[in-house]
Image: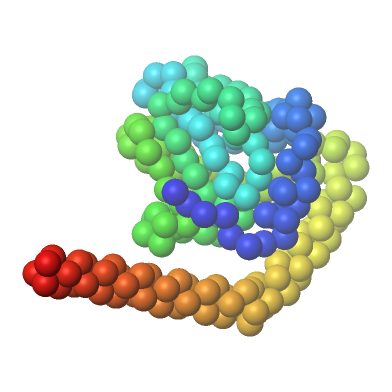
Amino acid sequence: MTKPPFSPILMGGLLLKAVPPELVQPVADHMAKRIMDRHPDVFERLTPLGPRTFLIDVVDLPWLFHLTVAHGNGEVLVLRRDDPTPANATIRAPLKVLFGLLDGTIDGDAMFFTRDMTFEGDTEAVVALRNALDGADIDFVSDLSAGFGRFSHSAETVINCVVDGYNRLDSSVQTMNESVIDPALRKTEAQQRRIEELEARCTRLEKALRRKSSVLN
């Protein structure tokens, strides 16, 4: 299973764990509508497959996103992690990776090879969805801000500022991760391996003593 990376999104996701899906649903509806309005070909290209459902597991957020694609339309349902969620395919990845796939700044094949993104279920549907997104030329900031009508330019400026601020924060978190957390984890893992080696030696010694005791008796 894809593990959530240590990032501002993960920390924010932990804080948002108590937020019910019903409050997130309007955001998901807005984003899905923006993609359908500006990039209708994304879902139309999946029409030959027939109705398909995708479970999008954003591993650093506390919710699941159930995407239904049918007849050239897409609908997203936000769910709790413990809700029953049958789907034709499940895709797991951090939010940053998923947004990178949407706007084409991240190579999907590379993410699969590095295990930053995993999937299970209907392989044909996952490949078709990936190819549809690759060919859509989605600009997340532009598409989202366009929904604000005559205030779209101001909205785009604000969104870009938020994105830039996040990138700076993420860079600082990654620096802390590389300089503090990763070394601590490596030390802990080395100590765990040493403990396991000592336990294995104790087990062998115990067995040898039992054999020796049985021979003497």
Counting the numbered discs, the total is 0
Q: Nearer the viewer, residue 45 or 1?
A: 1
Residue at figure coordinates x 65%, y 36% from the top left: 63
Q: Quadrant of residue 64?
A: top right
| Residue 33 rendering spot, x and y as whole percentages | 68, 29
Residue at figure coordinates x 36%, y 33% from the top left: 121
Q: What colour-coding does the image apply?
A: rainbow
Residue at figure coordinates x 85%, y 56% from the top left: 157
Q: Nearer the viewer, residue 55 or 68?
A: 55
| Residue 65 rendering spot, x and y as whole percentages | 60, 33
- Seen in the picture, residue 71 relative to 38 is either above or below; the reply is above
Residue at figure coordinates x 72%, y 60% from the top left: 8
In the image: residue 76, left or right of residue 145: left
Q: Nearer the viewer, residue 69 or 143?
A: 69
Q: Quadrant of residue 206?
A: bottom left
| Residue 42 rendering spot, x and y as whole percentages | 52, 34
Quadrant that contains the C terminus: bottom left
Tell me, yes or no, if residue 85 can be seen here.
Answer: yes
Among all residues in the image, which is located at the extreme left?
A: 215
In the image: residue 70, left or right of residue 124: right
| Residue 17 rendering spot, x and y as whole percentages | 73, 41
Among all residues in the image, which is located at the extreme front?
A: 217
Tell me, yes or no, if residue 100 can be seen here.
Answer: no
- Seen in the picture, residue 121 relative to 84 is either above or below; the reply is below
Q: Nearer the viewer, residue 9 or 156?
A: 9
